[in-house]
Image: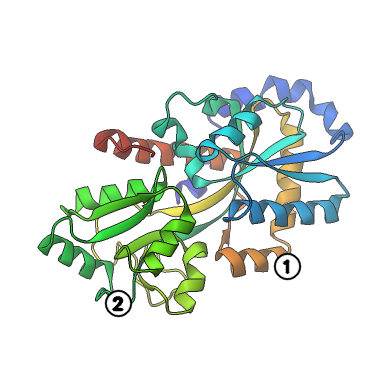
Amino acid sequence: MSNLHRRTVLTGSAAAVFGAPAIAKAQNVNDWPKGPVRIIVPFPPGGSTDPVARIIQAKLTDQTGWQVIVDNKPGGASVVGASIAAKSPPDGQTWMVTFDSHILNPAFAPSIPYKDSELLNVMLIGRTPQVIAAHPDRPYKTFAETAADAKARPEKVTFGVLGGSQALVLATLINKENALKINLIPYKGGGPLVQDLLGGVTDIGISSLASFSPHIRAGKIRPIAVTGEARTPALPDTPTLIEQKVKAFPSYSWWGVYAPAGVPRPIVDRMHAEITKAVRTADVTQKFQDQFNMEIMTTSPEDFAAYQKSEQERWFKVIKENDIKGD
């Protein structure tokens, strides 16, 4: 995540998007928006992305007077909604709020109907570490203990992961880099994954801190590792994978904003400023912390583009080398 802070130079592709077209259309910002502002969410209601978008929608409407509409376009692990956003006119009327799995789609499904270059990185809203948790009946207090058991009993320890996700790639990397044979069980949705972990169908599972927190507080699952660079204040007693000498990359769940490529830079800057103001308002920040344990980021378009590039280089390599499938 340090790349977010180090890389501030405008990349060539971003310069092309923000260059001449933005200058030519700069005067249009005074006439924008022209009608309702649409925020596409490429997932169904529920989960985390939809409420994140709706909290932002309400605050944007309150602070600007704009008519802001959240438009759920689920399907294809966010491919359907992302394709609609990418093909929308670059007039600043259409935006997209999505989740970290979005950037893995080109690796899992090379034939998707849009290109990354058709979507403009606007901002990273915030992030939260992922959590690895165990069913309370299992003996594991740390992931290191799980790894030791997995070495003693190859393929016997079961690990619930969301299919086509960063968590699946991370779990595969952990197996490979630590010479483990943990049995990865892919799920098509976060709900079934959580239910099977709660029911003891799987020994351990991985999800966002936002997803697991209610069950951790209720004592129904036990956190055994967090995937960030440092411990999270929400789970101060739970060590990172790095602390446990587990070989892996730091990993976070995150939420970001995109727009169709070609939206004039003055409009992008205005939307960025309004969303930043919205999410850094005390009540919204508190909601994001309470509901999602979110660390607010509000990065620049350039830093978000650089972060996406570095994350794709990192995870695409793991996907290719291990022939990981998205389904």
* Quarter of the rendering containing residue 35: top right
Observer-nearest residue: 42 or 197? 197
Q: Position of residue 229 (x, y in %)?
A: 39, 60
Q: In the image, what residue occupies the spot 60% across and 66% down?
A: 291
Which comes before the other along the chain, label 1 or label 2? 2
Measured Cα–Cα span from mark 1 to mark 2 = 38 Å
Quadrant of the drawing holding the C terminus: top left
Report the residue marked by disc 1.
283
Q: How many marks?
A: 2
Tell me residue 24's x, y (percent).
Answer: 77, 20
Q: Answer left or right for 50 relative to 212.
A: right
Q: Tell me the element at label 2.
A: loop
Q: How is the image coloured?
A: rainbow
Q: Which residue is mark 2?
A: 137
The image quarter in which residue 258 lies: top right
In this rendering, the answer to whether 316 lies above or below 236 is: above
The structure residue drawn at horizontal position 78% and vertical position 55%, both measured from the top left corner, is: 58
Q: Amino acid at mark 1?
A: Asp
